[in-house]
Amino acid sequence: MRKRSGVSVFLIVLLAFALLAAACGEDTGDGATTTAGGEDTATTAAAEGLKFGMILVGPSNDRGWSQAHYEAGQYLEEQLGAEMIFLDKVNVADLPDKTVDQVAQDMVNQGAQLVFLTSDDMRDGALLAAELNPDIPMIWSSGDNAWAEGEAPAPLDNLGNIMGRMEYGKMMAGCAAALTTQTGSIAYLGPLINDETRRLVNSAFLGASYCWENYRGETTPLEFTVNWIGFWFNIPGVTLDPTQVANGFLDGGADVILSGIDTTEALDVAGQAADAGEAVWAVPYDFDGACELKPEICLGVPYFNWGPAYLKVARAVIDGTFTATWEWNGPDWTDLNNKETTAVGFVKGDGLSAENSSTLDQFIAGLADESINLFVGPLNYQDGSTYLADGETATDAQIWYTKQLLDGVTGPSE
């Protein structure tokens, strides 16, 4: 018998390895592995290969709404090894030649496998972008097209919605303001007027009124005034100047300004007044680090934490289980500021006294165990019509679609 040559032995070894690889599975080249049974299983490579788009209405460093979304995108990059494509200031003033659907299409053309559209007023662009790219999952944050019970459902298999139940955060903000005010006058710096912004003003008013009456024992009605600038942040020549509006609040006797806009003017103006010796405070909005600009007069900040919900969506895209749903996510009441679990949090500021901090904790505990529910009638709208009848508990739809400000709030509803 002749001996096999070295080359023959080498070929046999190669063949054996090839057969073993075929039995165990082969690399498909797209970050997935096909098993011998033909099933696809997601791998780390698939997660690391995820590219997603993030469309922001304002600056990515606004210390408000847009920065909260941007940092959620960074969270996905950290958790998944994914890559974010982002564009900020996507609005008609900053980028008049770009529409939301065009920006989304650009991101898809760059390889985005998932797109987040992060403003209420992006509805038309989000719907069009999703229609034109039916194979690309998208999330329109703060929207309601995927809500079957909503007022204007527009279901698309690839367009879902995510929002946080900021109503709770605004109730906390209102309570902190009512516990602190020395003049009994609270002001709310509002953006544009729609269902979302009305329900958040109402939430802050309800929280303030509850704490004013139940914890401070006041019988004189609380003054609660809102003024709207016309957009989510200042656009010179288009909106009211939020700095001027905030100064007007203080000149009118308010000593606490609650912010409903995406930027920091409420805290900036109150900080300047405090530096001049006035006893004033502010509650910024949206972003957990907002108090850092003027911590000594900041009572706290209600903020959105988009990371956990966005991570859930990204993982569903990776493993092929994405479905277009409407989510209205609440706080993690067991750990309000746990960044891995909560959708809405509240960071207390140094301007909140120790006594008032303890009282606010009681209020938060009542919200958590539902012994305090402020959306229960009787509640009337500004025009005297009934919002909630005596003993009636508001449904999600009644809260989401808020048509007027409540009786007791001074300021326009439309």
Image (cartoon, rainbow, N blue to C red):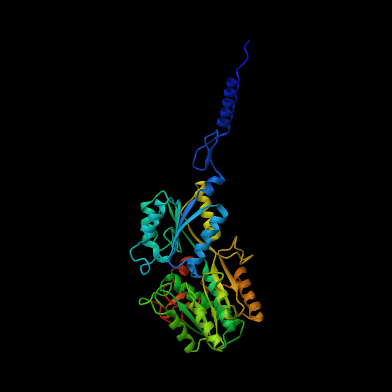
* Residue 69 percent coordinates (x, y): 50, 63
Up/down of 239 relative to 40, above or below: below
**Left or right side of 86 for 35:** right
**Left or right side of 267 for 98:** left
Up/down of 175 relative to 54, above or below: below
Up/down of 357 relative to 42, above or below: below
Q: Residue at x 66, y 80 (%)?
A: 354
Residue found at the far left of this picture: 97
Is residue 389 visible to the viewer in this orientation of the structure?
A: no
Q: Residue at x 36, y 67 (%)?
A: 92
The quadrant in which residue 173 appears is bottom right
- The quadrant of the image that shows the N terminus is top right
* Residue 287 percent coordinates (x, y): 53, 69
Is residue 64 visible to the viewer in this orientation of the structure?
A: yes
* Residue 211 percent coordinates (x, y): 58, 80
- The quadrant of the image that shows the C terminus is bottom left
Up/down of 112 relative to 395, above or below: above
